[in-house]
Amino acid sequence: MGLPTVGYAESSGELRALYDRMLARPLPPAYRTPHGGVAGIVQAHSIDPELLARVFAVSPTLLSDGPLTWTERELVSSSTSRINQCFYCTACHTEFLRLSLDGESELPLSLVAHPRSLRTASPRLKIIAEIAIAMAEAPWTLNAHHRDRAHVAGLDDDALVQLIMICAFMCHQNRIADAVGIGLDYDVQIKPPHADVSTPSFAAAPAPVTNRAVLELSRRPAAAAAFATWRSYVTDRDAPLTRRQRTVIARWVALWLGDGSISSPADLTVNPIDDALRELAEVVTLAPWKLSDASFARLRSNGMDDLAIFDACNTASTAGVISRMAVAVTALGRPK
């Protein structure tokens, strides 16, 4: 199951050069794969090397420094991945969380078993996980009470912006990992359950969030610039998907996530393939654990090849990154 990827041994040209640059980057030992090659989540983007370069230009801007500790960053990543039921990302980041705690397993085990009610965490860790989970499944439900509680627990607005960015980034990684179907390539002590495809989809937002933002993503300028470069690459081109098809997808995703900054899809005239694009984008956005070859069948029947279908998945996932951040920084200012 899944879309094709290109491993290091089969890579050449631009992709091989990208892989070599990524392998040469300084990384903590925990993030090095046992096989010494690029991580599976990197290879998951290999069908589109230009996208790979832009997506992974974001991660150093989020993870190298900031108010959140290594443990807190991994808690955001693993909580997000667990709620999205991404086996690969949950397994990896739960292991990184365990290593950040000097091998202590109590918190990672609690997260895998009870992600919504961590039993062993401090108030600070609990509100971090709560906000990450809310942002992953229903960002419009965030409100000023979450922000106030975060402040009481010692998280300032800079920490909240870092949390929001990491969660949005991980939501993308979860979706691409499942669209491609990558196998686990790290040795982990705690293995989460595989996705339960019978789990109902996340709910769509009942209404757009339109109040004024209370946080600015520009608090992390390098990350904001990297996200903008990634977004421009995805939205401002005409192949494999047309620009109009990208607009259709982004507007549907915004509607489902409550992003009031983007126009409704109802403003667009209808084309025959729109419904098939909406169908895949809905699974990517609201039920990524249900992604399978069947999710791609309708677009294949319309003549789309693997690269175009990957582009559709990525366009929906990237739109989710942008809309999730926009909704979170706005929703956190709303009264409870």
Image: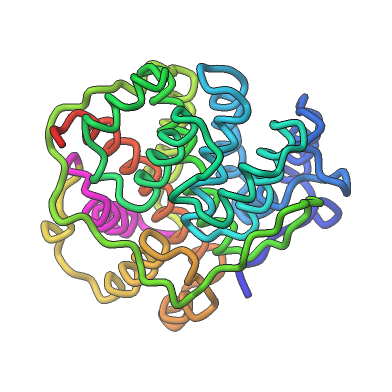
Residue, x 49% and y 47% (percent of image)? 80
Q: Give the range drawn in magenta.
A: 241-261
Residue, x 77% and y 28% (percent of image)? 28
**Viewer-side residue, 244 vs 195:** 195
Q: Residue 305 location, x and y as percent?
A: 53, 71
**Viewer-side residue, 237 vs 228:** 228
**Viewer-side residue, 244 vs 107:** 107
- Asked where in the image residue 307 lies, by quadrant, the reply is bottom right
- Asked where in the image residue 183 lies, by quadrant, the reply is bottom right
Display coloring: rainbow
Residue, x 63% and y 56% (percent of image)? 47
Q: Residue 148 location, x and y as percent?
A: 27, 24
Secondary structure that dominates the magenta span: helix
Magenta run includes residue 246: yes
Q: Residue 214 location, x and y as percent?
A: 22, 23
Q: Residue 51 location, x and y as percent?
A: 55, 44
Determine whether 293 is above or below 203 in the image.
below
Magenta run includes residue 175: no
Residue, x 64% and y 50% (percent of image)? 109
